[in-house]
Amino acid sequence: MNVSRAYSAVAPTVEGDVLVVLAGTTQPLTGRRVARLARRGSVAAVAKALDRLVSQGLVLRQEAPPASLYTLNHRHIAAPTVETLALIRTELLDRLRHAFSSWSIPPVHASMFGSAARQDGDVDSDIDIFLVRPAGVDPEDATWSAQLHDIGDAILAWTGNHASVIDFPEQDLRQLHDESPPVLADLRRDGIDLAGTPLRELLGSTP
Amino acid sequence: MSRDRAKDPRSRPCDAADARKRLADAEKYLEVAELVATEDSQESHNVATGLAVLAGIAAADAACCKTLGESSRGPDHQDAAIFLRRITPGGETAAKNLERLVGLKDKAHYSFLNVSSQDQTGAIRRAGKLVTFARTVLQR
């Protein structure tokens, strides 16, 4: 699925983008504001989507001339489904954090980075994971290898996307910092902490 | 509806890029607040608390920019809590944390009174919760 717009796996049209914006707030929003906050859709497309959702009763329209203001109808029987859809990315991050917390050899650090973290990927994008393997744990260690295999399987099952895992040895962190390859800038800018020492502490905030 | 809008605090438009910038500010303020708090002196209590307040305000801005497309720009930082409360889920709790935090602002920044060690600890804890909330909102 497209992890950047995870809700689109279930609600692929502009209506999905509109509903996710409205699910995030109790504040009535103009159609133009909804279009600005939505990940996709022109002002005209968003206006049409809002009209369709109002006709379904899922969105409420209040007239505030010259504008119309829209809110999610939280009493609608479909509203809980919308609220769940809006938090699908959070669910993925929660599952990843839970999975890493149960590892018998915990990583020094785990984070998601790349397009999945930047939210600019597509349905075919890999989910990039940066893992720091504790010093003293061999990359071929059976338990560690099984953990890597299992997290890859889990990510594929949860999202339909392949995991692309960087299994980085703790003892080489100093070298990573000194050489400052492009991936380091990606991690600092976009990385989402999942387990262990936070990125800011692990890598420092500047090269 | 028009009456409700007239009561709205002043705001400024902002977007996802602004949200990321304000979150980075909030994280740095919090980091420095925690560092200052390791010094055991009255001045460090005041300064660490002041920095924690700035972290909380920046975190509130970040969450509001991402979700509402606007953030508070009034001189009264309690206004920021009004916007924060409109974020779902989690905005209500975050707003309460911000209100308690901003309540320490004048004491920390301008007052001849001193901030207690207990206030400092509470301020950093609340700022931490607000930064975590903003991070979560930006990751949605």
Image (cartoon, coloured by chain):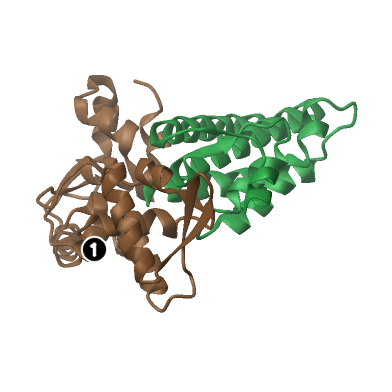
Chain colours: A brown, B green
Residue A202, by quadrant, is top left
Q: Residue at x 90, y 31 (%)?
A: B113
Residue B77, by quadrant, is top right
Left or right relative to A131: residue A123: left
- Looking at the picture, does residue B110 appear above or below residue B53? above
Q: Nearer the viewer, residue A9 or A162?
A: A9
Q: Which percent across, then down, holds residue B68?
A: 49, 45
Label 1 crowd bin: few (<14), some (14–19), many (20+), radius 10 Å: some
Q: Residue at x 28, y 32 (%)?
A: A173
Q: Nearer the viewer, residue A119 or A41?
A: A41
Element under disc 1: loop
Q: Which percent across, then down, holds residue B104?
A: 78, 39
Seen as rendered, the residue at the extreme front is A65
Q: Which percent across, then down, holds residue A61?
A: 47, 60
Residue B76, by quadrant, is top right
Q: Quadrant of the C terminus of chain A?
A: top left
The residue that mark 1 highlights is A11
Left or right relative to A76: residue A122: left
- Looking at the picture, does residue B100 appear above or below residue A81? above
Q: Quadrant of the N terminus of chain A?
A: bottom left
Seen as rendered, the residue at the extreme right is B112
Q: How many marks?
A: 1
Left or right relative to A160: residue A56: right
Q: Residue at x 50, y 44 (%)?
A: A66
